[in-house]
Amino acid sequence: MNLRDLKYLIAVAEKRHFGQAAEACHVSQPTLSGQIRKLEEYLGVTLFERTNRSVVITPIGEELLRYARVVVEQAEAMETVARTYRDPTAGPVRLGAIPTLSPYLMPLILRPLKTRYPRLRLVLTEEITDSLTRRLLEHEIDAALLATTPTAPELEARPLFDEPFWLAIPRAHPLYHAMEISADDLTTLDLLLLADGHCLTDQVLDLCRTIGSPRDGEMGDLRAASLETLLQLVGAGFGSTLVPALAIRGAWMTDTGVVARPLDLPEARRRISLVYRRSFPRRPLLDALAEVILEHLPNTVKPVKG
Amino acid sequence: MNLRDLKYLIAVAEKRHFGQAAEACHVSQPTLSGQIRKLEEYLGVTLFERTNRSVVITPIGEELLRYARVVVEQAEAMETVARTYRDPTAGPVRLGAIPTLSPYLMPLILRPLKTRYPRLRLVLTEEITDSLTRRLLEHEIDAALLATTPTAPELEARPLFDEPFWLAIPRAHPLYHAMEISADDLTTLDLLLLADGHCLTDQVLDLCRTIGSPRDGEMGDLRAASLETLLQLVGAGFGSTLVPALAIRGAWMTDTGVVARPLDLPEARRRISLVYRRSFPRRPLLDALAEVILEHLPNTVKPVKG
DNA sequence: AAGGATGATAGGCAAAGACTATCATTGCAG
DNA sequence: CTGCAATGATAGTCTTTGCCTATCATCCTT
């Protein structure tokens, strides 16, 4: 049985005339007659009672017609839905981002994305790198904004921008009046850290090792669950910390008595990439995402050339 | 787009494996791969994200899959329904019968029909000949039991049996003790008639003319709307009447003080036929109907040979 | 590094579907 | 009553579609 045959059935039932139905279906009358007859043979029932004068659907044909209508209707609905998704920038995209990036980047790009690609339906996830990577591999999300390069061979990273780390200190801190922080300044500080699992934690520790700071992890088990909490701790005088540049635009700067200062240290940065499966089919969508993100970055971060 | 392709889509989505899906569909893997690809091209969207290692449906594919499931499901339901109707003695039949026959014949055949053809769904209509003929021509009913031969060329009559007329008289009547009624007896009687439109009325009047009875229609405008009413009138002493043989089995014989006597008059009968459109496709069904009717007639009526 | 699993590709063949031409039936007009 | 118009059925031919076998490319595993 064929969708086409069902369309023929519906046409004949509606026109009650093989010639007119054939015309409506853009086929010749013999073609339509033959297909209807084949359908009748296949189903084993007579669908139409025909004379040279008239064509009338049988009661059984009427009952089957109802099914045929549903089938054709749903098939056409399917094509319609597919058509709306033909545009790669339309339809659902499941995008993940790490917690130290998401709350600060998303506000910058959601509105422009909606404006530029109104038919895009973004589903956001905010999790740490490992979780996002697992979800990528299991097709639970389509792309993720990470600060690390994925190791899984199925994944590919498209670098977007470099985000410097800034120093966050309380207003009462001696470095409050410094406009830029040096590596030496850093080594004098108690740097508070996020909980394990956040890539930011590892990257800060790496940096401390690089510049030879003895004070990595000095505060021991005092770890913040989120960047916001961490900054509350800084504001309360527990120490200072490094925050990614995009986060310094947050409300905490005025609320918590914490200020941020840039570092005079080029390697104090992380590289944000858009990570996706190599097999992900909607590449133009990734291009669109990347483009909108790059267009709406503040100048505290540096787009990656290329 | 093709129903088969949608089945392939569903199979691949369920198996997440082209080879296994192909096996389930009883086609080769290249065939299935090719058809899926064609479907993707036709729809303009990627349905599956494939690597050599895995096959995963895309979110868009998932959404379209829901439609495909409905389409295939309904199409299969349609085939199932058709299969149950393959037997010509299954499914709906719209049968009409004239009012002077229906109440007396139907009780005889409905139960046997149900027993012999349990899947038959009989829809009964009881109307006068003209109405039934019109309904036949307009495909509103499929067959009718009439006492006349239809004139329309699209209709065909299959004679079933001859039904003699009997005389119905009140118990108080002088002819009560006669076991058989002659034509001469008839001419002495006040024969009550049914309303116009009933073929029985015309046939009784014809008979009166034939036997030279002067008393046709003597009671003037006293016309009964139904045979039951007519017999109530007879029981009340308004006159006598002719009734078809099958009707003498009705309850009125004991209830109303009316008795029936056979006529010694071979032409005092009507021929009951099964009438249907020449184009009606379910001839075996008509055979079945005729056969059951003939098998369950009382011996007051004579089946037509041939 | 070799082997196995998996999906993609190429080439050939058979069936399905479509078209044109024609026929058969029937109702209607002259 | 005969010829014509309308309508669906039939016959024959051709194109398209779908399927198969054989083979390739890639990648994971041993």
Image (cartoon, coloured by chain):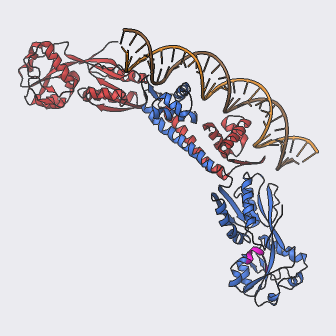
Chain colours: A blue, B red, C orange, D brown
> Which quadrant of the figure has residue A72?
top right
Q: Quadrant of residue A89?
A: bottom right
Taking A21 as reference, is C14 left or right?
Answer: right
- Say whether residue B46 is visible: yes
Of residues A261 and B18, which is closer to you in this image?
A261
The residue range painted magenta reads: A241-248
Please state the horizontal and vertical placement of residue A51, each as a whole percent of the image.
Answer: 43, 23
- Image quarter (top left, top right, bottom left or bottom right) of the C terminus of chain A: bottom right
Total marks placed: 0
- In the image, residue A244 lies in the stretch drawn in magenta: yes
Report x, y in % for residue A121: 63, 59
Image quadrant in which the N terminus of chain A is located? top right
| Residue A120: quadrant of the picture | bottom right
Compared to C16, does A175 lie above or below?
below
Examine the structure image and report whether residue A5 is included in the region drawn in magenta. no
- Left/right placement of residue A44 relative to residue B252 reads right
The location of residue A17, given as percent across then percent down, is 46, 29
- Residue B223: x, y in percent? 14, 29
Residue at horizontal 12%, vertical 25%? B192
